[in-house]
Amino acid sequence: MKKGLYPEVGTYYDEDAADFDSRYWMNPVLQQIRQSFREEVKSYPFKTMLEVGCGTGIDLVHFGLTHPEVQVTGIDISAEMVRISRDKIADSKLTNVQAFTATVEDCPALFQDQQFDLIYVFFGALNTVEDLSVNAGILRRMLAPDGKLVVTFVNKWYLGGIFLEAIRLRFRRAIARLKPVWGGYSAVKYLPSRCYSPAEILTAFSGFRTIRHHGYSILHPAWYFTGINRKLGRLRKILWKIDEMLTLTPLWRFGEYTLFSFEKADRAHQHILRTGVSDIISLP
Protein backbone atom coordinates (compact mmCIF):
# COMPACT_ATOMS: atom_id res chain seq x y z
CA MET A 1 0.00 0.00 0.00
CA LYS A 2 1.23 3.46 -0.80
CA LYS A 3 2.45 5.75 1.93
CA GLY A 4 -0.06 8.29 3.11
CA LEU A 5 -3.14 6.15 2.49
CA TYR A 6 -4.93 7.29 5.65
CA PRO A 7 -6.71 10.29 4.07
CA GLU A 8 -8.09 7.94 1.39
CA VAL A 9 -9.27 5.46 4.03
CA GLY A 10 -10.77 8.27 6.11
CA THR A 11 -12.70 9.61 3.12
CA TYR A 12 -13.97 6.11 2.31
CA TYR A 13 -15.47 5.70 5.77
CA ASP A 14 -16.75 9.28 5.91
CA GLU A 15 -18.84 8.45 2.85
CA ASP A 16 -19.80 5.06 4.32
CA ALA A 17 -21.01 6.46 7.64
CA ALA A 18 -24.49 7.72 6.75
CA ASP A 19 -26.19 4.34 6.26
CA PHE A 20 -23.64 2.19 8.10
CA ASP A 21 -25.94 1.37 11.02
CA SER A 22 -29.00 0.60 8.91
CA ARG A 23 -27.00 -1.87 6.81
CA TYR A 24 -25.55 -3.46 9.93
CA TRP A 25 -28.93 -3.98 11.62
CA MET A 26 -30.20 -5.71 8.49
CA ASN A 27 -27.43 -8.33 8.68
CA PRO A 28 -27.94 -11.00 11.39
CA VAL A 29 -24.64 -12.74 10.61
CA LEU A 30 -22.67 -9.57 11.32
CA GLN A 31 -24.58 -9.14 14.57
CA GLN A 32 -23.81 -12.69 15.65
CA ILE A 33 -20.12 -12.29 14.89
CA ARG A 34 -19.98 -8.97 16.77
CA GLN A 35 -21.59 -10.55 19.82
CA SER A 36 -18.98 -13.31 19.78
CA PHE A 37 -16.23 -10.66 19.63
CA ARG A 38 -17.84 -8.90 22.61
CA GLU A 39 -18.01 -12.06 24.67
CA GLU A 40 -14.27 -12.56 24.16
CA VAL A 41 -13.62 -9.02 25.44
CA LYS A 42 -15.89 -9.50 28.44
CA SER A 43 -14.01 -12.63 29.49
CA TYR A 44 -11.12 -10.43 30.72
CA PRO A 45 -10.98 -7.97 33.64
CA PHE A 46 -10.57 -4.28 32.81
CA LYS A 47 -11.21 -0.83 34.23
CA THR A 48 -10.07 1.11 31.18
CA MET A 49 -10.53 0.09 27.55
CA LEU A 50 -9.69 1.45 24.10
CA GLU A 51 -11.40 0.56 20.83
CA VAL A 52 -9.40 1.00 17.63
CA GLY A 53 -11.73 1.63 14.71
CA CYS A 54 -14.83 2.48 16.74
CA GLY A 55 -16.93 3.31 13.67
CA THR A 56 -20.35 4.70 14.58
CA GLY A 57 -19.91 3.82 18.25
CA ILE A 58 -21.99 0.64 18.35
CA ASP A 59 -19.58 -1.07 20.74
CA LEU A 60 -18.52 2.07 22.61
CA VAL A 61 -22.11 2.59 23.69
CA HIS A 62 -22.61 -1.12 24.36
CA PHE A 63 -19.63 -1.37 26.73
CA GLY A 64 -20.41 2.03 28.23
CA LEU A 65 -23.84 0.71 29.22
CA THR A 66 -22.81 -2.79 30.29
CA HIS A 67 -19.74 -1.55 32.21
CA PRO A 68 -20.68 1.84 33.70
CA GLU A 69 -17.69 1.65 36.06
CA VAL A 70 -15.23 1.40 33.13
CA GLN A 71 -13.67 4.29 31.21
CA VAL A 72 -14.33 3.52 27.53
CA THR A 73 -12.37 5.31 24.80
CA GLY A 74 -12.60 4.95 21.05
CA ILE A 75 -10.62 6.18 18.06
CA ASP A 76 -11.44 6.11 14.36
CA ILE A 77 -9.80 7.49 11.24
CA SER A 78 -13.15 8.81 9.99
CA ALA A 79 -14.25 12.16 11.42
CA GLU A 80 -17.83 11.46 10.35
CA MET A 81 -17.87 8.10 12.14
CA VAL A 82 -16.59 9.82 15.28
CA ARG A 83 -19.23 12.53 15.01
CA ILE A 84 -21.96 9.88 14.90
CA SER A 85 -20.32 8.07 17.84
CA ARG A 86 -20.32 11.23 19.91
CA ASP A 87 -23.99 11.85 19.12
CA LYS A 88 -24.84 8.34 20.32
CA ILE A 89 -22.76 8.80 23.47
CA ALA A 90 -24.59 12.07 24.22
CA ASP A 91 -28.00 10.56 23.45
CA SER A 92 -27.24 7.68 25.85
CA LYS A 93 -26.06 10.18 28.51
CA LEU A 94 -22.83 8.25 29.00
CA THR A 95 -20.21 10.13 30.97
CA ASN A 96 -17.72 7.25 30.91
CA VAL A 97 -17.30 7.10 27.10
CA GLN A 98 -15.33 9.32 24.72
CA ALA A 99 -14.32 9.16 21.04
CA PHE A 100 -11.53 10.80 19.04
CA THR A 101 -10.58 11.10 15.39
CA ALA A 102 -7.16 9.41 15.29
CA THR A 103 -5.04 6.55 14.00
CA VAL A 104 -3.02 4.18 16.17
CA GLU A 105 0.08 6.20 15.25
CA ASP A 106 -1.58 9.31 16.73
CA CYS A 107 -2.21 7.63 20.10
CA PRO A 108 1.15 8.27 21.83
CA ALA A 109 0.67 12.01 21.40
CA LEU A 110 -3.08 11.90 22.03
CA PHE A 111 -2.93 9.83 25.21
CA GLN A 112 0.70 10.53 26.21
CA ASP A 113 1.56 8.21 29.12
CA GLN A 114 -1.94 6.79 29.52
CA GLN A 115 -2.25 3.00 29.34
CA PHE A 116 -5.31 0.78 28.98
CA ASP A 117 -6.21 -2.51 30.66
CA LEU A 118 -7.79 -3.77 27.46
CA ILE A 119 -7.58 -2.75 23.80
CA TYR A 120 -9.84 -4.28 21.17
CA VAL A 121 -10.14 -4.08 17.40
CA PHE A 122 -13.29 -5.44 15.76
CA PHE A 123 -13.90 -6.23 12.08
CA GLY A 124 -10.37 -5.77 10.79
CA ALA A 125 -9.62 -2.10 11.41
CA LEU A 126 -5.90 -2.96 11.34
CA ASN A 127 -6.23 -4.30 7.80
CA THR A 128 -5.94 -0.69 6.62
CA VAL A 129 -2.82 0.38 8.55
CA GLU A 130 0.41 1.22 6.74
CA ASP A 131 2.67 -1.02 8.83
CA LEU A 132 1.16 -3.74 11.01
CA SER A 133 4.32 -4.36 13.05
CA VAL A 134 4.66 -0.66 13.89
CA ASN A 135 1.03 -0.55 14.99
CA ALA A 136 1.50 -3.69 17.09
CA GLY A 137 4.44 -2.05 18.86
CA ILE A 138 2.42 1.08 19.64
CA LEU A 139 -0.48 -0.98 20.96
CA ARG A 140 1.91 -2.90 23.20
CA ARG A 141 3.23 0.32 24.74
CA MET A 142 -0.33 1.52 25.31
CA LEU A 143 -1.30 -1.62 27.24
CA ALA A 144 -1.03 -1.62 31.01
CA PRO A 145 1.07 -4.39 32.63
CA ASP A 146 -0.80 -7.70 32.18
CA GLY A 147 -3.14 -5.89 29.79
CA LYS A 148 -5.10 -7.78 27.14
CA LEU A 149 -5.42 -7.11 23.42
CA VAL A 150 -8.28 -8.60 21.37
CA VAL A 151 -7.78 -8.09 17.63
CA THR A 152 -9.71 -9.35 14.61
CA PHE A 153 -8.62 -9.43 10.97
CA VAL A 154 -10.02 -10.04 7.54
CA ASN A 155 -8.22 -13.28 6.72
CA LYS A 156 -6.07 -13.83 3.64
CA TRP A 157 -6.76 -17.56 3.50
CA TYR A 158 -10.55 -17.60 3.42
CA LEU A 159 -10.91 -20.87 1.52
CA GLY A 160 -14.72 -20.87 1.55
CA GLY A 161 -14.80 -17.48 -0.15
CA ILE A 162 -12.21 -18.51 -2.75
CA PHE A 163 -14.27 -21.60 -3.57
CA LEU A 164 -17.63 -19.80 -3.76
CA GLU A 165 -16.28 -17.07 -6.01
CA ALA A 166 -14.44 -19.59 -8.21
CA ILE A 167 -17.53 -21.69 -8.89
CA ARG A 168 -19.28 -18.47 -9.93
CA LEU A 169 -16.38 -17.92 -12.37
CA ARG A 170 -15.42 -14.72 -10.54
CA PHE A 171 -11.75 -15.58 -10.55
CA ARG A 172 -10.45 -12.07 -9.85
CA ARG A 173 -12.58 -11.81 -6.73
CA ALA A 174 -11.61 -15.35 -5.75
CA ILE A 175 -7.93 -14.41 -5.47
CA ALA A 176 -8.35 -10.74 -4.48
CA ARG A 177 -7.31 -11.31 -0.85
CA LEU A 178 -4.07 -12.96 -1.90
CA LYS A 179 -2.79 -9.83 -3.65
CA PRO A 180 -0.45 -7.37 -1.87
CA VAL A 181 -3.27 -4.80 -1.82
CA TRP A 182 -6.90 -5.81 -1.34
CA GLY A 183 -9.61 -3.47 -2.57
CA GLY A 184 -12.11 -4.16 0.21
CA TYR A 185 -15.51 -5.83 0.18
CA SER A 186 -17.28 -3.49 -2.21
CA ALA A 187 -17.18 -4.14 -5.95
CA VAL A 188 -17.77 -0.44 -6.68
CA LYS A 189 -15.78 1.39 -3.95
CA TYR A 190 -12.05 0.80 -3.60
CA LEU A 191 -10.54 0.58 -0.11
CA PRO A 192 -6.75 0.16 -0.03
CA SER A 193 -6.07 -2.52 2.54
CA ARG A 194 -4.26 -5.78 3.10
CA CYS A 195 -5.43 -9.22 4.18
CA TYR A 196 -3.12 -11.00 6.63
CA SER A 197 -2.52 -14.67 7.19
CA PRO A 198 -2.45 -15.97 10.78
CA ALA A 199 1.32 -16.48 10.47
CA GLU A 200 1.83 -12.84 9.44
CA ILE A 201 -0.28 -11.64 12.36
CA LEU A 202 1.60 -13.74 14.89
CA THR A 203 4.90 -12.43 13.53
CA ALA A 204 3.76 -8.80 13.79
CA PHE A 205 2.51 -9.38 17.35
CA SER A 206 5.49 -11.45 18.49
CA GLY A 207 5.96 -9.08 21.44
CA PHE A 208 2.79 -10.49 22.98
CA ARG A 209 1.86 -13.80 24.53
CA THR A 210 -0.95 -15.49 22.60
CA ILE A 211 -3.87 -16.45 24.83
CA ARG A 212 -6.18 -17.87 22.18
CA HIS A 213 -7.22 -17.68 18.55
CA HIS A 214 -10.51 -18.21 16.78
CA GLY A 215 -11.74 -18.53 13.20
CA TYR A 216 -15.11 -17.30 11.91
CA SER A 217 -17.11 -18.41 8.86
CA ILE A 218 -15.08 -21.51 8.17
CA LEU A 219 -18.07 -23.44 6.81
CA HIS A 220 -20.71 -20.86 7.73
CA PRO A 221 -21.01 -18.44 4.76
CA ALA A 222 -19.49 -15.01 5.37
CA TRP A 223 -21.75 -12.11 6.32
CA TYR A 224 -21.63 -10.58 2.83
CA PHE A 225 -23.06 -13.71 1.16
CA THR A 226 -26.49 -12.39 2.07
CA GLY A 227 -28.43 -14.36 -0.53
CA ILE A 228 -26.86 -17.67 0.51
CA ASN A 229 -27.37 -16.94 4.20
CA ARG A 230 -31.01 -16.09 3.59
CA LYS A 231 -31.62 -19.36 1.76
CA LEU A 232 -29.87 -21.42 4.45
CA GLY A 233 -32.35 -20.34 7.12
CA ARG A 234 -32.04 -22.48 10.25
CA LEU A 235 -29.11 -24.39 8.76
CA ARG A 236 -26.99 -21.34 9.61
CA LYS A 237 -27.23 -22.22 13.31
CA ILE A 238 -25.91 -25.71 12.62
CA LEU A 239 -23.04 -24.37 10.51
CA TRP A 240 -22.20 -21.84 13.25
CA LYS A 241 -21.96 -24.65 15.79
CA ILE A 242 -19.79 -26.70 13.42
CA ASP A 243 -17.50 -23.67 13.05
CA GLU A 244 -17.24 -23.48 16.84
CA MET A 245 -15.86 -27.02 16.79
CA LEU A 246 -13.64 -26.48 13.74
CA THR A 247 -11.98 -23.47 15.38
CA LEU A 248 -10.45 -25.93 17.86
CA THR A 249 -8.67 -27.63 14.95
CA PRO A 250 -6.05 -26.33 12.47
CA LEU A 251 -8.94 -25.35 10.19
CA TRP A 252 -9.46 -22.17 12.26
CA ARG A 253 -6.85 -20.60 9.96
CA PHE A 254 -9.18 -20.69 6.96
CA GLY A 255 -12.19 -18.66 8.12
CA GLU A 256 -13.32 -15.27 6.83
CA TYR A 257 -12.21 -13.54 10.02
CA THR A 258 -9.55 -14.47 12.54
CA LEU A 259 -9.54 -13.34 16.16
CA PHE A 260 -6.50 -13.27 18.44
CA SER A 261 -6.35 -12.54 22.14
CA PHE A 262 -2.92 -11.44 23.33
CA GLU A 263 -1.40 -10.59 26.68
CA LYS A 264 1.35 -8.06 27.15
CA ALA A 265 4.59 -9.96 27.65
CA ASP A 266 7.35 -8.65 29.93
CA ARG A 267 10.78 -8.00 28.42
CA ALA A 268 12.23 -11.36 29.41
CA HIS A 269 9.30 -13.22 27.91
CA GLN A 270 9.42 -11.03 24.82
CA HIS A 271 13.10 -11.96 24.33
CA ILE A 272 12.23 -15.66 24.56
CA LEU A 273 9.35 -15.24 22.11
CA ARG A 274 11.63 -13.47 19.62
CA THR A 275 14.77 -15.63 19.92
CA GLY A 276 13.63 -18.88 21.50
CA VAL A 277 16.48 -18.50 24.02
CA SER A 278 16.28 -17.64 27.70
CA ASP A 279 19.01 -15.49 29.29
CA ILE A 280 18.22 -17.02 32.68
CA ILE A 281 20.77 -19.65 33.76
CA SER A 282 19.73 -22.06 36.48
CA LEU A 283 22.49 -22.64 39.03
CA PRO A 284 22.93 -25.99 40.79
Image (tube, helix red, strand yellow):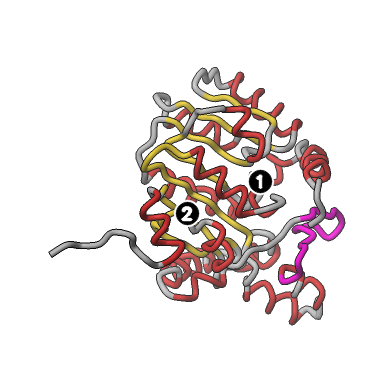
Query: Residue at 56% of width from left, 27% of height from top?
Result: 112
N-terminal of the two: label 2 or label 1? 1
**Residue type (three-letter) at the residue carrying disc 2:** Gly
| Residue named by callout 1 | 24
Where is 168 relative to 76, above or below? below
Disc 2 residue crowd, few under 14, some 14–19, many 20+, Cα 10 Å: many
Quadrant holding the C terminus: bottom left
Magenta residues: mostly which secondary structure?
loop
Q: Which mark identifies residue 207? A: 2
Above or below: residue 170 compared with residue 193: below
* Mark 1, secondary structure of its residue: helix
Q: CA distance from mark 2 to mark 1?
A: 34 Å
The N terminus sits in image quarter: bottom right
- Furthest residue in direction left, as rendered: 284
Magenta residue span: 178-192
Q: Which mark is residue 274?
A: none
